[in-house]
Image (tube, rainbow, N blue to C red):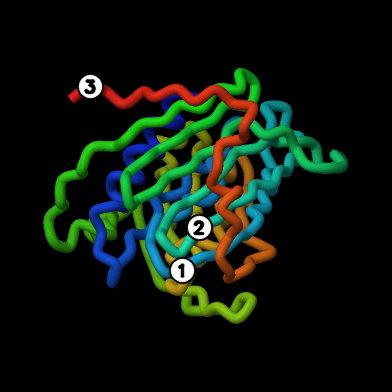
Amino acid sequence: MRFFRLELVALILLAATATAQTPPRPRDYRGVQIHIDGIFVTPVPNAPFTAKVDIISHEILPDGSINIRTTVNHIARSSSGRIYNERRQLVPATFKGEPILLSGHIYDPTNRLNIFYDPPTRIARQTFLPQPPRPPAGAIPARTPSDNPYFKQEDIGTQPLGGLTLTGIRKTRTIPATMSTTGKDIIITDEYWYSPDLAVYLIIKHNDPRTGEQLVAVTHIGRHEPPPTQFAVPATYKLVDETPPQ
């Protein structure tokens, strides 16, 4: 859980340095795993919305069978750029209802207040992040060098979704047969469909023939101001300030 928090803090520091004209794209998807981050909500202003994130995982088990699990996350962003995100338990496809909440995350870019709350312990940990350094011009977004023979990135056009126009990128990584331990090339493919209007990925598709497939999709998008309660720590939680001393 602490690694998950540190990674999100690093993403927030990076996002806070970008200009309003060119919001940063979220980091690359990591693939099928036990804990799934879902969609990273970029803390940019003037683009409020609420949405659900549907996650479907087809994991290939050692015996060759497929373990299908799903979950749903709720996300939101206010006009000021304040964000809410969460992570819920992966459950079998036959599960009915809403999966258990594992963690909640609130971040406010106006004062850099970062809060993670933990439902099992009912503790909310807040930190005021330091002013991040300004990255070099052109550092966001980064691209993998084009001279890498085992990597290819290509634009795959646009597609409409709920009144938005998404731009697509496909990233293909090849593990050559001499290094794959399978005797043949392994091709890992990731597709990202990005909404410039919302500055988030709305669809992510991952395929690795060794571990399986995964789909992360933003649905039920409402382009309106979320209620203030969406960004409030529940009253039953104990708030702990973990901001380091100056």
Name the residue tied to disc 2. Answer: 77
Q: Nearer the viewer, residue 27 or 155?
A: 27
Q: Nearer the viewer, residue 84 or 27?
A: 84
At horizontal 64% and vertical 47% (from top left) the residue drawn is 73
Amino acid at circle 3: Pro
Amino acid at circle 2: Arg
Q: How far is disc 1 from disc 3 in space, using C-alphas? A: 34 Å
Q: How far is disc 2 from disc 3 in space, using C-alphas? A: 29 Å
Name the residue tied to disc 3. Answer: 245
Regarding mark 1 in the picture, which secondary structure is present there? loop
Q: Of circles 1 and 3, which is in front?
A: 3
Q: Of circles 2 and 3, which is in front?
A: 3
Name the residue tied to disc 1. Answer: 47
Crowding at dot 2, Cα within 10 Å, few <14 / some 14-19 / many 20+, comes out as many
Q: Where on the picture, by quarter, is residue 70?
A: top right
At horizontal 41% and vertical 60% (from top left) the residue drawn is 80
Q: Where on the picture, by quarter, is residue 88?
A: top right
Which callout, 1 or 3, points at the residue further toward the start of the chain?
1
x, y percent for residue 56: 69, 48
